[in-house]
Image (spheres, rainbow, N blue to C red):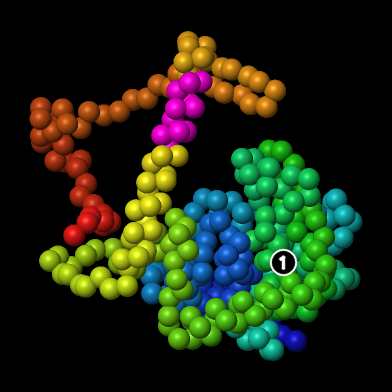
Amino acid sequence: MYIKIPIAGMDRKEWLELRKTGIGGSDAGAICGLNPYSSPMKVYQDKTGSVPEQQDNESIRQGHDLEEYVARRFTEATGLKVRCSNFMYRSTENPFMIADVDRLIVGQDAGLECKTASAYNADKWKDGKIPLHYVMQCYHYMAVTGKRTWYIAAVILGRDFIYQKLEWDDDLIGQMIEVERKFWTDHIEKGIMPAPDGSGICDTVLGQYFPTARKESVIRLDGFDDKLVKREKIMTQISELQKEQNQIEQEIKLYMKDNESAVSENYRVSWSNVESVRIDTKRIRQERLEIYQDYAKVSTARRFQIKAA
């Protein structure tokens, strides 16, 4: 069962605050470690509000604006009518789970998730595949609403329109709910940030939480020596593998000489000309200091370094 929260006419700030009161469908894949563009640490940041929420980027804007088009194409392809819900749903059994769904299927116990994908990501949807974080998003919506079926439709910009049907899965949904419950109770309710997972998004989150260092401040580094020894070994392995990779590429370049491309049964290699234009800032600083000072922008970032004691 669920309760319905009206969102028609709700302003964006109020809607964003409402989203912080629970785990939504777009959070599910990240919490389960399946979203390449997010992480549990990023979801924690979004829910706790420790860092101001950023404005939508162009990709998010296009996805929102094209949602109606995707829904219309779905109706054309399937004959199924859809409608907006105008509500956010909150599970009564698991109140930490919320759902802001794209569309509901008229006359069926089902919903629809609308997606817009770049042509560069077309391979992720090839042969009936669905990116796993989108799969988890649909199952999250099923878990909150109790609906047994969820469709996902996607427009691959400039290429294709596809849709798939997902059915209720007791085991998968049960495991997902437990992962989300543990995340909410262990991290959100206790105010404890999840451990980093090595992803680039975690670097971004840490940089936003701790953007500047207190100069001359020093703390003792306890409990990390073994990990730093392991890091040194990893760095050595990376260096050796990078050298081996470079050697293979150099051998191919020597084989190709001044040819732009080389092809085999399995690979196509290009070694093409690339032209670029760069502003010589060093020369401008030396010869036209006043212009350099007018356009120079000072930025602050933190540099992470490790040295043997």
Please tell me whether the stretch drawn in magenta is mainly helix, strand or loop. Answer: helix
Q: Is residue 86 visible?
A: no
Q: 170 or 299, which lies in front? A: 170
Q: Amino acid at mark 1?
A: Cys
From the viewer's perspective, is residue 254 above or below residue 10?
above
In x, y percent, where is residue 230?
38, 58
Q: Is residue 217 magenta?
A: no
From the viewer's perspective, is residue 275 above or below residue 151?
above
Residue at position x 87%, y 60% in the image: 80
Extreme residue toward the bottom, this view: 93
The picture quadrant where one finds residue 101 is bottom right
Q: Secondary structure at mark 1?
A: helix
The picture quadrant where one finds residue 286 is top left
Determine crowd level at label 1: few under 14, some 14-19, many 20+ residues with C-alpha closer than 10 A. Answer: many
Residue located beneath label 1 in the image: 138
- In the picture provided, is 98 more to the left or to the right than 191? right
Residue at position x 68%, y 47% in the image: 124
In x, y percent, where is residue 98?
63, 78
From the viewer's perspective, is residue 147 above or below residue 202?
below
Q: Is residue 246 magenta?
A: yes
Span shown in magenta: 242-252
- In the picture provided, is 133 more to the left or to the right than 274? right
Q: Is residue 213 visible?
A: yes
Q: 140 or 108, which lies in front? A: 140
- In the picture provided, is 9 more to the left or to the right than 289? right
Which image quarter holds the N terminus? bottom right
Extreme residue toward the top, this view: 258
Which image quarter holds the C terminus? bottom left
In x, y percent, where is residue 209?
34, 68
From the viewer's perspective, is residue 135 above or below residue 256?
below
In x, y percent, where is residue 128?
79, 49
Residue at position x 37%, y 49% in the image: 235
